[in-house]
Image (tube, rainbow, N blue to C red):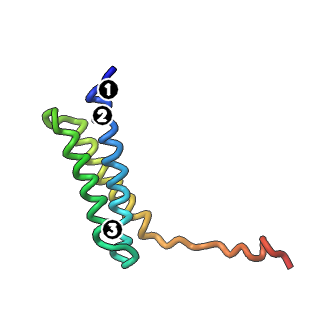
Amino acid sequence: MPVSYEFLRGVLGVLCVLFAHMAGRSAIAVRKRRQKLSKFYGWVVRAAVCALGLSLRHPLDTIDIAVWLLSLAAFAAGWWDASREKSTEDLTREIFPE
C-alpha cells in the first residue's frame, strides 16, 4: 500500500520547521565563531529543499504558506534560544558536602 502524497507533504513540512530551527541556532553559533559557516548553509539548504518540495506537485496553497511562516518563526525561536546566556549551576556543595 503506497503512502499518500499528503502524508509526505506533512512530513516535509515538519522537517522544514525543524531544519529552520536548527538553522537559527547555527546562525548564532557562526556569529559567536563556535561553528563553521558551512554548517549553517547546510541547515539552510535542507530547510529550503523541504520548503520547495512541499509545492512540487501541488500549486501554492495554505499548507505551503503555513509551513513557511512556521519555519520563519522556528528560525527566530532557534536564534533567540541560542543567543541567550545559559548559566551553569555550581553543584559542588550539593555533591560534596563539607
The image quarter in which residue 67 lies: top left
Q: Secondary structure at mark 1?
A: loop
The image quarter in which residue 40 lies: bottom left
Whether label 1 touches label 3, CB < 8 Å: no
Image point 40% across, 64% down: which residue? 80
Q: What kind of residue is marked 2? A: Leu
Sort mark 1 into few (<14), some (14-19) or many (20+) by Cα contacts within 10 Å: few
Q: Kindly report which numbered mark, 3 or 2, lies closer to the viewer in this rendering.
A: 2
Q: Which circle marks residue 3 in the picture?
A: 1
Sort mark 3 into few (<14), some (14-19) or many (20+) by Cα contacts within 10 Å: many
**80 or 92, which lies in front?**
92
Q: Kindly report which numbered mark, 1 or 3, lies closer to the viewer in this rendering.
A: 1
**84 or 40, which lies in front?**
40
Image point 26% across, 64% down: which residue? 41
Whether label 2 touches label 1, CB < 8 Å: yes
Q: What kind of residue is marked 3? A: Ala
Q: Which residue is mark 2?
A: 8
- As drawn, which residue projects farthest toward the left? 59
Which of the image's four quarters has the C terminus?
A: bottom right
Q: Which residue is mark 3?
A: 27
Q: What kind of residue is marked 1? A: Val
**In the rendered structure, which disc, 3 or 2, sits on the residue that comes first in sequence?**
2
**78 or 52, which lies in front?**
52
**Above/below status of 37 relative to 17:** below
**In the rendered structure, which disc, 2 or 1, sits on the residue that comes first in sequence?**
1
**Above/below status of 67 relative to 93:** above
Image point 71% across, 73% down: which residue? 91
**Real-space CA distance between mark 1 and mark 3, rounded to the nearest whole angstrom:** 35 Å
Q: Secondary structure at mark 3?
A: helix
**In the rendered structure, which disc, 1 or 3, sits on the residue that comes first in sequence?**
1
